[in-house]
Amino acid sequence: MILLNMKMFIKWIIKNKEHIKRYSMILASILISVVIIYFRNELAKLSSFGYLGIFLISILGSATLVIPSPTLVATYIGGSILNPIIVGLLSGLGTALGETTGYLAGLGGTEFIKENKNYRRVEKWMNKSGFLTIFILGIIPNPLFDFAGIFSGATKYPFKKFMLATILGKTIRFIGIALLGNSFL
């Protein structure tokens, strides 16, 4: 009886592996956000670790979905204390890596997003101007970048292009923020 149930369960997993994979991506993105929010006070303490702390704050801070993070403040203050170019580079790279959660959430939610009447328009836009859009949204401080990651994943925009545009845009932004911190503090 147990073996029969196990066989049925394994067949069900094999049959539904794509759904399981997609739901796992969405769940992982949500869980990462919840864990980061829960441990936000400990996250703030990472800044005492210098460059490494700023890099970790950047990764973890941008891994949350649509929730503001301490990355801007850490970069601004870090730029006033440490070499602002290095702080900006590490913050840009860290936030780009953290944005992977949005991409994964979009990749996992492709089926849901495809049902939206505007999906085809967004997909066409991403194929035509995705790199430039992601790059510009990466430069501009705004909470909407998570949606760029979600739409990139949902439209299956190439991950390497997404990461390159994100790294370039966010690095430019955070070098500017670190230089501002260096100038004013």
Image (cartoon, rainbow, N blue to C red):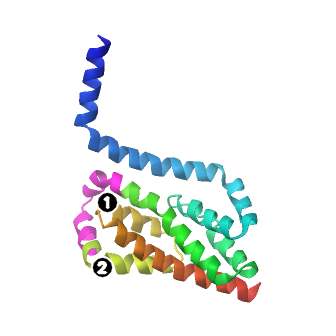
The quadrant of the image that shows the C terminus is bottom right
Tell me if 32 is positioned left or right of 55 in this view: left
What residue appears at the point 41 percent right and 76 percent down from the top-left corner? 165
First of labels 2, 1 by sequence position = 2
The quadrant of the image that shows the N terminus is top left
Which element type, helix, strand or loop, lies under badge 2?
helix
Tell me if 9 is positioned left or right of 175 in this view: left
Q: Which residue is mark 1?
A: 154
Q: Position of residue 127 (x, y in %)?
A: 25, 73
Tell me if 53 is positioned left or right of 12 in this view: right
The prevailing secondary structure element of the residues shown in magenta is helix
Q: Looking at the picture, which amino acid does disc 2 mark?
A: Ser
Q: Which residue is mark 2?
A: 129
Q: Position of residue 111 (x, y in %)?
A: 27, 51
Magenta range: 107-125
Q: Position of residue 68 (x, y in %)?
A: 58, 64
Q: Position of residue 4 (x, y in %)?
A: 26, 16
Other residues around mark 2 within 10 Å, as few (<14) / some (14–19) / many (≥20)? few
Tell me how far mark 2 sits from mark 1, CA to CA: 15 Å
Q: As displayed, is residue 44 above or below residue 34?
A: below
Q: Quadrant of residue 45?
A: bottom right
Indicate yes or no whether the magenta region holds residue 36. Answer: no
Residue ranking furthest to the bottom = 183
Q: Looking at the picture, which amino acid does disc 1 mark?
A: Ala
Q: As displayed, is residue 152 above or below residue 76?
A: above
